[in-house]
Amino acid sequence: MGAYVLLCDLSLAPAVSLAKTRDGHRPEMIRRYACADRAAFEAAIQTYIDQEMDMAPSAVAMSGRGWQDREKLYLQGVAFELNRDDMRTLAGVQRVNFLNNFVARALAVPRLPRADRYQVVGGDVHDDSVIAVLGPHHGLGLAALVSDGVGGWAALHGEGGHSDLAVKTEHEWRLVEAMRAKTGYVSRETGISVAGLSDIWYALHVVAGDTPSPMTAVEIIAAAREGRPRAREAIDVMTGWLAAMASDIVLIMGANGGVYLTGALLDMIGDLFNEDIFRTRYLDKGPRTAYVSAVPVFRTQSADMELAGLATLFE
């Protein structure tokens, strides 16, 4: 067996999730550390190597909200900068891989046990067809998997969350105009994300002629659980927009292998996710309804998908 690889995910910054893997197996010894600054991040890496690994790692694989340009990593939500040489020096390795966090999530999908997903709508899975992974997190993540025909997958990172937010009704148009007046620009991410839920809540007040009362996504979800109708409506509006995007992605990508819904906001919403609203909006594609209705849509129920996806780089 090969030496252990260090896996590092910064998707939940200012926390870092660390794990180890060998030969591409599922991550082991998952630990989380606070990393508000560069010193805390470096201390977390060193502590993990010293306490959880019996020797220096053979490589490092990282994921986070952001992108890379040659050697530099552009990380969102992190109050410090990193490049590949920093990680090579810190961990004592030569190989350093970096993936956008949603690309890492996508790579985990083909290995998801059946117990870690459940189907919301659609037909049977078509093996070796394009798979889309979509979900509201701090932003709105999108990635795709394309089969290589011999059991492997190539992951493609997309920025579809920044595409224009399309509306279906006059009420939705009024909500978007209220959000535009507040933020200056409205993309799909403006309404389908953790921050977006707060903006929908704000817009619902404006459209109703009420004075907006700022609330976080956590507070809105708690209010919905208490039975407050406007909080419930905010979640339902977001759900409808997510469903419309999911079926758009099926048509754009030909994602007959399925759409997998994932991300922090869906985890937070939990059983408040209205599947009937999702199905109705997802299937509202006019003459192409039959096409999208054959494509399965799943909600993932697996923790630490970024780490699991990073591990696949070493199979």
Image (cartoon, rainbow, N blue to C red):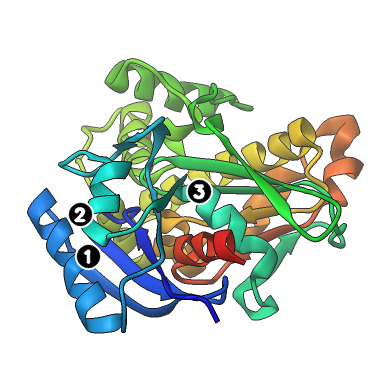
Residue 83 lies, in percent from the top left, at 28, 40
Mark 3 vs mark 2, CA separation in Å = 18 Å
Q: Residue placed at 31% from the left, 28% from the top?
A: 206
- Helix, strand or loop under label 2: loop
Give 168 or 196, whichever is nearer the viewer. 196
Quarter assignment of residue 246: top right
Q: Earlier in the sequence, mark 1 or mark 3?
A: 1
- How many other residues sit within 10 Å of disc 3, few (<14), some (14-19) or many (≥20)? many
Mark in the foreground, 2 or 1: 1
Amino acid beneath label 1: Ile
Mark 2 vs mark 1, CA separation in Å = 14 Å
Residue 270 lies, in percent from the top left, at 47, 67
Residue 226 lies, in percent from the top left, at 33, 67
Q: Is residue 245 above or below residue 146?
A: above
- How many other residues sit within 10 Å of disc 2, few (<14), some (14-19) or many (≥20)? some
Mark 1 vs mark 3, CA separation in Å = 22 Å
- Helix, strand or loop under label 3: helix
Left or right of 79? Residue 2 is right
Give 78 or 310, whichever is nearer the viewer. 310
Mark in the foreground, 1 or 3: 1
Return the residue at label 1. Answer: 45
Q: Which mark is residue 14?
A: 2
